[in-house]
Image (cartoon, rainbow, N blue to C red):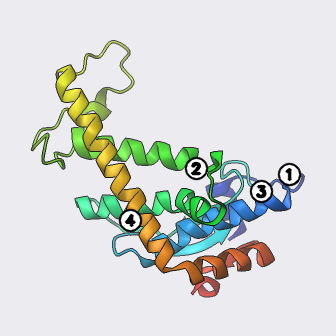
Amino acid sequence: LDAVDRIIGGLEKKNKIISPEEKEIVAYHESGHAITGWFLKHTDPVIKVSIVPRGLAALGYAQYLPEERYLYTSDGLTDRMVMMMGGRVAEEIIFGQVSTGAQNDLERITKMAYAMVTDYGMSEKIGYISYNLSAHRDEPFYDKPYSDETGRVIDDEVQLIVKGVRDSARKLLEEKDKELHALAQALLKKEVLSAVEIE
């Protein structure tokens, strides 16, 4: 288990001193991921939550057991984005403001939402078209294969997806308010929780 933690999250930073206020934010952030992941239909099972600072995982992480899956439906992608948004929304609900801790989550959500619209044909307004932008993202002089007007429609569709994801995460976490507090407080006490302890 230590080896798995080291590979997934990096080396434990024993010398990283975190203030109690920051530790509480991290505990609620990670609990937000874990709670949304636990109760959504199309997410991987949560097997561990940690607020021990590590090299690659920054100040904490929730660990999942990925299923052998090659195809994702739009519902499956949306549930995964709701889970990623769970940390940011938990901060918003509990503290009334947000921190910079969700930057990586927001980056992944944004990429996934754009992929749904421009690569996978999962937008009614754009239709069953794939511009396959992900194949060309690293090419510096690649021209986007659509007009500025279509670009604005794509941006609007992505905004709608992300807003829907945020609203879903907020609704779920407000319904599971008791579990969110219980999990965060348990994390503050123990720092690492296994699947059995989470359950």
Crowdedness of circle 3 by 10 Å Cα count: few (<14), some, many (20+)? Answer: few
Find the distance from the CA under tag 2 to the CA under tag 3.
13 Å
Label 1: element kind: loop
Say whether disc 1 or disc 4 marks the residue closer to the N-terminus: 1
Residue at (72, 74) in percent of width and height = 187
Report if the CB atoms under discs 3 and 4 are less than 8 Å apart. Answer: no
Q: Which residue is mark 1?
A: 16
Q: Is residue 50 left or right of residue 116?
A: right
Seen in the picture, residue 178 relative to 59 is either above or below; the reply is: below
Q: Position of residue 183 (x, y in %)?
A: 64, 78
Where disc 4 sits, the SS reads helix
Q: Amino acid at mark 3?
A: Glu
Nearest to the observer: residue 94 or residue 41: 94
Q: Earlier in the sequence, mark 2 or mark 3?
A: 3
Q: Judge the density around disc 1: few (<14), some (14-19), many (≥20) Cα neighbours within 10 Å.
A: few
Q: Are marks 2 and 1 in contact (CB under 8 Å)?
A: no
Q: Earlier in the sequence, mark 2 or mark 1?
A: 1
